[in-house]
Amino acid sequence: MKLYCLSGHPTLPCNVLKFKSTTIMLDCGLDMTSTLNFLPLPLVQSPRLSNLPGWSLKDGNAFLDKELKECSGHVFVDSVPEFCLPETELIDLSTVDVILISNYHCMMALPYITEHTGFTGTVYATEPTVQIGRLLMEELVNFIERVPKAQSASLWKNKDIQRLLPSPLKDAVEVSTWRRCYTMQEVNSALSKIQLVGYSQKIELFGAVQVTPLSSGYALGSSNWIIQSHYEKVSYVSGSSLLTTHPQPMDQASLKNSDVLVLTGLTQIPTANPDGMVGEFCSNLALTVRNGGNVLVPCYPSGVIYDLLECLYQYIDSAGLSNIPFYFISPVANSSLEFSQIFAEWLCHNKQSKVYLPEPPFPHAELIQTNKLKHYPSIHGDFSNDFRQPCVVFTGHPSLRFGDVVHFMELWGKSSLNTVIFTEPDFSYLEALAPYQPLAMKCIYCPIDTRLNFIQVSKLLKEVQPLHVVCPEQYTQPPPAQSHRMDLMIDCQPPAMSYRRADVLALPFKRRYEKIEIMPELADSLVPMEIKPGISLATVSAVLHTKDNKHVLQPPPRPAQPTSGKKRKQRVSEDVPDCQVLKPLLSGSIPVEQFVQTLEKHGFSDIKVEDTAKGHIVLLQEAETLIQIEEDSTHIICDNDEMLRVRLRDLVLKFLQKF
Amino acid sequence: MDGQTRLGMLHRLLVLFWPPPQTESVILSPLSFSIYRGHKIQHSDWHKEPLRIMDPECSRLLPALCAVLADPRQPVADDTCLEKLLDWFKKVTEAESSLLLLQENPCLVELLSHVLRPQDVSPRVLSFSLRLAGTFAAQEDCFQYLQQGDLLLGLFGEAGTLGWAAWNVPTVRSGWIQGLSSLAQHPSALHFLADSGAVDTVFSLQGDPSLFVASAASQLLVHILALSMHGEAVEHHSPQGSAWPTCAQKIVGHVEESLRSTAAPQVTQALNVLTTTFGRCHSPWTEVLWEQLSPLVACLLERDPIPAGHSLVDLLLSVARSPVFSSADCGLWETVAQTLSRLSPTQAGPLALGTLKLQHCPQALRTQAFGILLQPLACVLKATTQAPTSPGLLDGTLGGSMTVDALLSSKSACAGLLCQTLAQLEELHPLPHRPSPWPQASLLEAVVTILQLCDGSAAPGSSVGGRLCGTLAGCVRVQRAALDFLGTLSQGTSPQELVPQVFAVLLEYLESPDSSPTVLKKAFQATLGWLLSSPKTPGCSDFGPHIPLFLGELFPVLQKRLCSPCWEVRDSALEFFTNLSRHWGGQADFRQALFSSEAPTLTQQLLRDPESYVRASAVTAMAQLSSQGLHATLASPEHPEAEQGLLREFLNILSADSEGFPRRAVVQVFTQWLRDGHAEVARDTEQFVATVLQVVSQDLDWEVRVQGLELAQVFLTQKLGQPGHCPYTVALPEAPLPRLRPEVLRTLCQPWLLEFAFRALFDCDRPVAQKACNLLLFLRDKTAPYAGTQETGDSPHLDSMEAALQRWQAGEQGQPLGDPEPEAMLAVLRSLDLEGLQGRLAESSDHVEKSPQSLLQDMLATVDILEENEADCY
């Protein structure tokens, strides 16, 4: 059993598990932090961005000044943003049989895998994962395609040149494999390969293994997966949450008794408590708006935004913010808000019960109805007519490199009355802000990451007790910035096996058993004999039939009739091996003292017994014969005296049971 | 019709209508007697005559009750009746002779004899009877009387209760012990105990599975020991143990044996008995006892692990606190010292604290004990700092630091130990005889470090420190304990260089989104403590160098907290803001920081908060700001209307808020404003009070009405009271009375004021009626000298007053008082028996139901009901 690790990002995993005869890809996350090295794509022409000076080497060589621009001491690539794909060289991805998706954030690399690697298998995911995943991809494609950029920079990727660049460009990994965003056509094609599954549904893969999605409590339709055969169980834990937010709660019990537990997708901000951060978010939002400032919240179009809107729904009246407009701008804003209301079965109990009242499960419906929350596909069109300030804007993309957020950063960045509040934990807010410096607007960092923290993980591991834990290497040591925080790492026994990008791990357990079925008629013919209290044995002679990874014992064909035709006899002998008449099997042990007494009774004398490491040797000195008695074998060694051997054999057999 | 006739009619009418028709409420009962002089209705005053407790009526009921108790077919409804009955018998026997009681009521002895037939008695009646027998037998003559029929031996002897199946019921065993405890009061009882073998049974009951029984058994042993030693010390000065009475020797022997036992529970029992003995008995013989037993106690310290550590600590503290040992040495301090060094830090903590609280204690021991309390903090400092900089804390405290280090490395033990230590030091801090020198600087350093470890902001150098950081990160318990202690430390003199560190860590906590609401509240409290205690620059009215800087950072945080989505946080922030403004409202630095912030505006917005507690706190805060002219943005000289707006807003809250808390806060504020002569109130006080009382009288919350009466009281005091004159003392007759001007009299007798007070007098909530009664008494006494000078006259006002009062009394609230003349008002006021009413209101509402007669009747009635129910069932 092997695990191929194609991604180094702990929360955007992409691993391939070879288990029995199957090859299973676990998630295909897309690392978008690479886009932070690029200049933002402004929706409206930005003189500031277009007038940034080109970057030149220390010696004044300016051959890269078209590709690289400098802003407040940072260097950015002036090109269409590119993404860092999962490793494609480590394993032939065309051999992947299935891809299991755990949540919509972990499927963003799917088109790259399904459309460009010769992949011919099936992708399994829950319905909300697919629908919201589609929205995220659609938004991404839209953000990038609607600002066409003529220039595509590639010179800087040359290894010799990259070495000369300042950090972080110098240290960027595998820049040659970075790719532009996929197209909508590729997205549609990739999504067509997905087969929808429900929680706890058992899916057979080639009869060899069974995979089952379990609720993980992190997002709508998010799942952990169990991959099991009859005797082995591997659990794959991706983004999971034990907090009470909108999704169905996490199913922990089903993860018990795993041989291996692959643990990914823990919180990225282990020191921040989501509750505290939501409080911080609300307070800062209120303070800014009261001062007449605007609030910008860069966010994804689904996920935490639902919880934030719910908090604000409860908060705005108490904070006297009822008249402040909330805008949600995304090409998929409408779909996201509406989709969230129809996935009742994937929601937590409270929200599910609302559906039967009937009421919309999320209160943002009421915010929309009362015109407190308005949503627009983009800043163009209706939005510009309705727009009034001060206001709160939720929009993407959290990297601040593309999407409508770029416009608001340019528009509001100059005033200290305004505030940008970062709630998504995927990007470093300082790096995200780098191309907007100098910036007058206030920046508040309230990362809300509801995924498991280390305390919860340690409780979970105690509860489910896997034999082995496998996790990204980042989880086996404290965060670099807080090296003394020994509590911010996974602590389990035996220590977790860690992996990094492009590692291949041999998982530390051997398969020992295989399940074989017995046909009823064959089972009927067995006559078990009790050899020890509670243990019965029966011999079986049968033909092992293996098909589709299923093994069946079938009754052996009847011995060929001597009278039957020659032709038929030949056919039978071709199909099955000859069945010989079997000698009975023996069981039991030989008590040496009694055996010696029996020998003496039968006229043997001069018997000597020697103890050996494995048993005893009974020496019949007179007859020059040796009887070697061991735990599972007895040998009679005598020279050419078949009579004696048979006599001795019969004496030995007296002590043993036959069946 | 002249005035007197009218008043007479009023009397009759009120008597006719009293009690009010709606008397279903129990609360109305204190008012259900005439309040008029000369019309008091007589009622059973049993409780006012302690001399004759057993009245004939009770005596009459007793046989029936005893018959019920003795009858197993008539189960007693509940234990509380039996408890009350027993309490009553105790009261009776305290006042009267038990013997006489038994002789006059033979049914009682019959009951006691009846329970000797165990098959016929329920366990609860058996337990009751055992205790009752003990109560009677506490008097020696009665004891002898009961002994004559071997009744006591039957109940308490080995042949009695002990052998019955009912003995397995814990209540019965408990009753047996309590009965013996009551009985053991005289020498005859001692002989009885010795002869009946009861002491051995008590020994075995020390290990009873029921904790109540086990504890009572220990107490009883102490009681018997004390009783048997009673008088011994007087006759022979502290005789040696071998010369003690047999019973005492037996108990001491048992204790010694238990102390030698290897079983921890037995050791615990012995230690508990000794702890109680030294706690209760302070005769010289206890010194002999300690001399005899202390070697055995010292032996316990040599065992590993030390058995019953907590009980050992209790014993040592009990001995040390006993006045008998205040001067004598007798090796106690050595044992304490040894125990301190041998016990684990968690167990030694309470002993160390107890030792330090003792007035007389060798200095060396105090140093050792203090060292033990400081040890965990010293270890924290050692683990987090590269070089130890605080010799005060680290000196000589690291002896047992290995153990402490080990404890600190386990998550649960670490939090427990630190919380305990911090709480103990906090308790020690304000004591006048706390250890000296008090290592204020080191303690501050340690507590700041702990707080930094808890919020993850510390960056310890060592691996131990790293582990500690991981263990304590986010530990709310330790955060709360540390903030409490930090707040307490503000009361000492701290080195100036540490103060910025304290403010920095407090700011971190106030700012951190991860601070839980309870932690935040503690942080606010600690901050307030430090701000208020920070030294001011000499010769200057304003603050030292740290404070203005800190305030500059504090206000943005405060603003953020006032906007928190969590109401507890908003509430704590408001409370903090109010307190800070109260103390610092006059300081220029503070005013400057406040005016440049939005805190006042935010506070005003919180008057409309959805949470009622927050609205109440906002009312108090706004009132505070307004009183000190800090209501800047709204109440500046250019905006005088803003202040009026606030008054209007408060009145609006008072009349419209759906919850009681904000309304109560508003009336309190108004009362304070009236006292302080707030500008808004002073403009037209009468109108202000009238408006407020009109609103308050309609309020459904009794606390608001009580507050309203307080406001009225303040108003009256201002009008009538002399400066420095207590409103509640009646002026001496010979003192010259100031002439009450007619307009003042008219003001006082304004219908809105008296109507409010009279209505309150009929209030169904007792505190309101009491307060109203006091108010009217005050008014009556103040106006008494002027009454009768004018004839009430044939006034049509009296008619309307009669009608109104009757209706109010009848529970109809609609009828207004009209506009009667002051004289009519005063006449009504004088005719009321307010003193009588005051006395009756002071009684609890169930005083009638509390009488023993009622108890006996209830018990008998319950049995009847139970019987009826039974009949219904079949």
Image: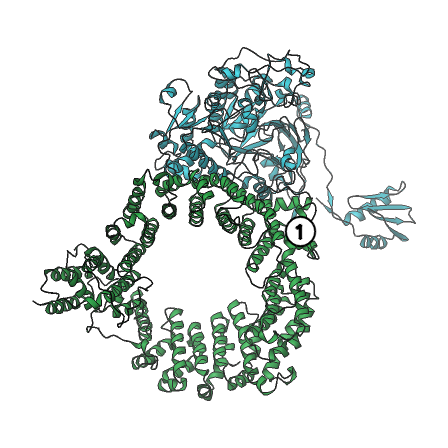
Q: Which residue is at the far left? A: B1
Q: Quadrant of the C terminus of chain A?
A: top right
Q: Amino acid at mark 1?
A: Ser
Q: Nearer the viewer, residue B606 or B497?
A: B497
Q: Is residue B600 above or below residue B440?
A: above
The chain coloured green in the image:
B
Asked if residue A251 can be seen in this view, the reply is yes
What residue would you read off at disc 1? B390
At 61% across and 85% down in the image, what residue appears?
B237
Q: Quadrant of the N terminus of chain A?
A: top right
Tell me residue A228's x, y (percent).
59, 34
The chain coloured cyan in the image:
A
Dividing the picture into quadrants, the one containing residue B292 is bottom right
Dividing the picture into quadrants, the one containing residue A509 is top right
At 36% across and 84% down in the image, what residue appears?
B105
Q: Is residue A369 above or below residue B656?
A: above
Could you say whether the residue bearing mark 1 is in a helix, strand or loop? Answer: loop
Subunit of label 1:
B
Horizontal placement of B332 versus B608: left or right? Answer: right
Horizontal placement of B328 versus A291: left or right? Answer: right
Q: Which residue is at the far front? A: B539
Tell me residue B258's x, y (percent).
64, 72
Which colouring convention does the figure follow?
A: by chain
Q: Nearer the viewer, residue A350 or B604?
A: B604
At 62% across and 62% down in the image, what residue appears?
B352
Asked if residue A557 can be seen in this view, the reply is no
